Image: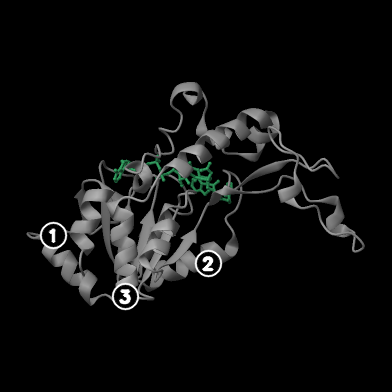
Amino acid sequence: MRDRRYAHPFRDLRAKLREASSVCVLSGAGMSAESGIPTFRDAQTGLWANFDPMQLASEAGFRADPQRVWDWYQMRRDGVRQAAPHAGHVALARYAARHPGRLTILTQNVDDLHQRAAAQAGEGARIVALHGSILSDRWLDACPRDEDLMRRPCDPSRAEPGHPPRCPDCGNRLRPGVVWFGESLDYRDLTAAEEAASACDVMLVVGTSGTVWPAAGLAARARHAGAHVVILNTQASEIDDEAHIVLTGSAATLLPRLLDPL
Ligand code: BV8
């Protein structure tokens, strides 16, 4: 349950963040909202309002209507490319640059805003993209050449333009390089995330509804391993009970108040 001993949350939390040797961030779509990227469920505005994101973000949904799903991802990619990291991304990146090796960011987001902020601040954070990247592509099916030692597998960068692009040699379709619902996370990413959550002194859970597993379970894992868990969100989430304290507010406002210039 949440711990209500905090009379001066920011002062006490800043002291913990100053003393911590390992800090984890678990971020969700709310972390990107103030950069103009709609949260996952809000991404179904306008043309997409009538489509279930779970259906669109699934292999079955893609195979059922490749063009619709491909175009949905193209629309979202355009939004990511037009977006920029906000003060919250920058505060995390600068904290990491000041304390190299201390911060691990476990993001559910498929944009590259944490990565861009880290590159601008001078690295320092380890970033685990649990659900892949919307800016990358891979083949939908195994390439028939994978089994042929005499021929190199087909190259995604040579796919012919289309909705989705296809391989000119074997007809394979491209798909976004993300983890869809019903697909397992990369075991290396999940293992790294679980280890980081189990080892951290403080976990900041930022902008996630806590509805998607196994990522949502990382907050409980951190708590059970002894971490101090802090939720930063504009609304209640499904994992609030895993937090020692819930800070109600936005990522771009709260993170600089917590981290600058620790
Ligand atoms: C898997 C990539 C093995 C694609 C995504 C256990 C229990 C129940 C179900 C399951 C389970 N284990 C597995 C499942 C099935 C499923 C799942 O979790 N279903 C849920 C929905 C019931 N999980 C999977 O399929 C995972 N695979 O486990 O493989 C398996 C398979 C099948 C069955 C069993 C086991 C794969 C999940 C990954 C799916 N891919 N993304 C793409 O993006 O197109 S998930 C996608 O949705 C996002 O990446 C993100 O993870 C999620 C959305 O969640 P949030 O990030 O939290 O965003 P949301 O919009 O919900 O909330 C935004 C929050 O921000 C809100 O709280 C809001 O208040 C807050 N906010 C808004 N503005 C701000 C803010 N906060 C701060 N500041 C602000 N300014």
Q: Residue at x 18, y 58 (%)?
A: 257
Nearer the N terminus, badge 1 or badge 3?
A: 1
Residue pictured at 22% horizontal, 57% vertical: 256
The x and y percentages for residue 150 are: 92, 62
Label 1 and label 3: CA atoms lie apart by: 22 Å
Dot in front, 2 or 3: 3
239 relative to 180 in the view: left or right: left
Q: Amino acid at mark 1?
A: Pro
Q: Amino acid at mark 3?
A: His
Task: Classify mark 2: helix, strand or loop.
Answer: helix
Residue at which label 2 appears: 191
* Nearest-to-viewer mark from 1 and 3: 3
212, above or below 256, in the image: above
**Circle 3 sits on which residue?**
99
- The secondary structure type at the circle numbered 3 is loop
Judging by the rendered image, the residue that carries numbered circle 1 is 9
* x then y, percent, for residue 107: 43, 55
Question: Which residue, as the protein is rendered here, is positioned at the far right?
Answer: 150
